[in-house]
Structures are given as C-alpha cells and as structure tokens.
Image (cartoon, rainbow, N blue to C red):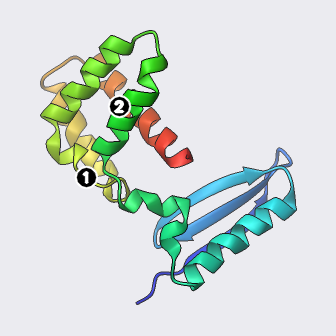
Amino acid sequence: METQIIATVNKRSCGKWQTIVCKDTRSQSQSFTRRADAVNCARRMELKGERGNPRDAPMLASERISLGDVLVRYRDTVTSLKRCVDNERYAIRGFLRTCPTLSQKRIDKLTTANFVAHRIRRLQEVKPAIVVRELGWIQHAINIACSG
C-alpha cells in the first residue's frame, strides 16, 4: 500500500493561511501571510508524494533521525548560545548515556508512552523539578528539529 501525502489550506483567525500536510498519522503545519504561498506549498508537497520522492519533504526527515541525533545537534548549536551552557551540556550528555533506548528511538516513532515511562523511571531517581527541566529541553530540541 502506497502512502499518500494529503495537504489542506486553512485560514487562521489571525489572518494568516496555514498549510497542513499529513502522511499516515503524522502531520506538519506551516503558516503563510499570503494564501497563494500556502496553496503553492500544499501543491508542492502533494506532488512530491505523487512522484514517489516524498523523502524530499521536510516533514519526512524525521524518519531517519533519532532523538539522540536531535539532542546532539541541539547541544552543539542551541545550547552553546545559552548562559547555562555547561549545565545543559552536562544534562544532555547524561541523558544520552543513561537513556539509550529512548535516545536511539527515531523521532517519528516516539510516543507519549515512551516519555511517560521515562518520567516514571526518572522520578524514582531525582526530584520532580529536574524531570520537568529535562522534559523542557527535550521538547525544545524536538520543536527546533521539526521547525527546520
């Protein structure tokens, strides 16, 4: 069964136009100020799927990237610009070392259950504030990786 890429264009309440591109159960959205730009983006993504080269689509890069790869890139590019660079680098290195099953999982295969299990395990080892902080930079790293 061939996977289809379906794109829709919606007008948002703020006046912007939003393109939502869906593949299987995953979706990615992008906002534009002009409707023509949103429609062009939607057409471009659907054509890539029809031509059989959906790998060119930015949303599908996650099929090749693991959470560990995202965190390493985040540590090297984003964390180095922060004031808490040493603390966050130390925390990311520790996460990569102590959570190999989660860090080796591909981004598109991550589920809420993975993070719930991680949270439960970590709460037995450290205080809740540390777990919240960890989940915060993990979420930030994933958001940055998905946005471009």
Q: Is residue 78 above or below residue 99?
A: above
Q: Is residue 128 visible?
A: no
- x then y, percent, for residue 30: 67, 53
> Residue 139 location in percent, x, y?
42, 36
The residue mark sitting in front, 2 or 1, is 1
Q: Distance between the residues labelled 2 and 1?
A: 16 Å
Q: Residue 34, position in %: x, y? A: 86, 55
Q: Residue at left 77%, top 68%?
A: 40
Would residue 70 appear left or right of 49 to someone viewing this image? left
Mark number, residue 44: none
Quadrant of the image containing the N terminus: bottom left
Residue 19 versus residue 131: which sits nearer the camera?
19
Alpha-carbon neighbours of circle 2 within 10 Å: few (<14), some, or many (≥20)?
A: some
Q: As drawn, which residue projects farthest toward the top?
A: 83
Q: Quickly name the residue at label 2.
A: 135
Q: Quadrant of residue 35?
A: bottom right
Q: Residue at x 51, y 73 (%)?
A: 54
Q: Which residue is painted at 81% across and 60% down in the image?
A: 37
Q: What residue type is labelled 1?
A: Lys
Q: Is residue 36 left or right of residue 88?
A: right
Q: Where's residue 115, x and y in %?
A: 28, 42
Can you identify the residue that label 1 sits on? 105
Q: Which residue is drawn at 13% across and 23% down?
A: 125
**Secondary structure of residue under mark 2:** helix
Callout 2 amino acid: Leu
* Residue 107 seen in render: yes
Q: Which of marks 2 and 1 is nearer the N terminus?
A: 1
Is 111 left or right of 127, judged from the image as shown? right
Q: Is mark 1 on a helix, strand or loop?
A: loop
Q: From what the image shows, is residue 22 above or below residue 117?
A: below
Instruction: Decide: few, some or many residues near mark 1? Use Cα within 10 Å; few <14, some 14-19, many ≥20.
Output: some
